[in-house]
Image: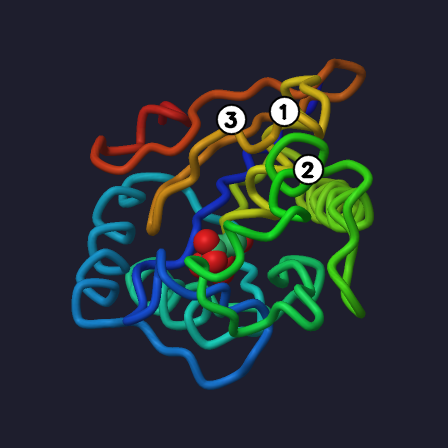
Amino acid sequence: MTQSTLILLVRHGETPTTGTVLPGRAPGLHLSERGRAQAEAVADRLSGLPVEAIYSSPLERARETAEPTAARTGTAVAEEAGLLECDFGDWTGAALAGLTGLPEWQTVQHNPSVFRFPNGEGFSGMQARIVGTLETLRAAHPGGVVVCFSHADPIKAAVAHALGTHLDLFQRIMISPASVSAISYADGKAPAVLTVNSTSEPLSGLRPA
Ligand SMILES: O=C(O)[C@@H](CO)OP(=O)(O)O
């Protein structure tokens, strides 16, 4: 029987606007100094895992978070558009303080499955995209350890799906900057969520040697 495939989902490290602006897919947002330190810490925490492949959202903050892990493991980073941030459409670049007062914000929080960002992507479409992408990557690396660098909302949606949690409840899942969440996929079985939003522990125990 093939060993399970382990997919690690890493949110990018902090940027100068994390928590204050909805950056979305706007280009040119880089890690802050603290974010770069978090990216190094991710590489430390993953050391000891037999990483077979690394994929990243094409956005700078995700690529920069992947770099130390790539250097440490000697594994090239492949860009994967399926790991991109949600397309926030007209809300891209908006200050969160200005969005939280909008009536639509209540839908974003409490009924996201029906919400589509104006001129952007819907949460349901985003979830289908990230789940489909992980399915493709797991099929490409049977039995392997695959590290994927992505963004908060897609990771939350992927974890919710693996848990069997409805998308309308996905805002209850916390995904912090530079956190690692792990899902194991075995043939013929439901996915197993091994850890969510891990920000401090070493992770080599997820795939004992
Ligand atoms: O703005 C945020 O809080 C999240 C939403 O997914 O984005 P990112 O993980 O790209 O910072």
Label 3 CB, ligand 1: below 8 Å? no
Picture layout, residue 131 above or below residue 21: above
Taking the image as shown, residue 101 lies to the left or right of residue 170, namely: left
The foreground one among 113 and 52 is: 113
| In contact (CB < 8 Å): disc 1 and disc 3 | yes
Cα separation between marks 1 and 2: 30 Å
- Regarding residue 145, the answer to whether it shows in the image is yes
User: Which quarter of the figure has residue 49?
Assistant: top left
Picture layout, residue 114 above or below residue 57: above
**Residue lying furthest bottom:** 28
Q: Which amino acid does label 2 sit on?
A: Pro
Q: Which amino acid does label 3 sit on?
A: Arg
Residue 180 in picture, x, y percent from top left: 39, 40
Quarter holding the C terminus is top left
Residue 192 in picture, x, y percent from top left: 59, 18
Residue marked by disc 2? 142
Residue 169's disc number: 1
User: In terms of secondary structure, where does tag 3 sit?
Assistant: helix
Q: Which residue is drawn at 51% across and 26% down?
A: 172
Residue 172's disc number: 3
Label 2 CB, ligand 1: below 8 Å? no
The foreground one among 77 and 115 is: 115
Taking the image as shown, residue 169 lies to the left or right of residue 48, namely: right
Residue 189 in picture, x, y percent from top left: 74, 14
Q: Residue at x 67, y 19 (%)?
A: 165
Residue 208 in picture, x, y percent from top left: 37, 23
- Reading the chain from its start, which is encountered first: label 1 or label 2? 2
User: In terms of secondary structure, where does tag 1 sit?
Assistant: helix
Q: Which amino acid does label 1 sit on?
A: Leu
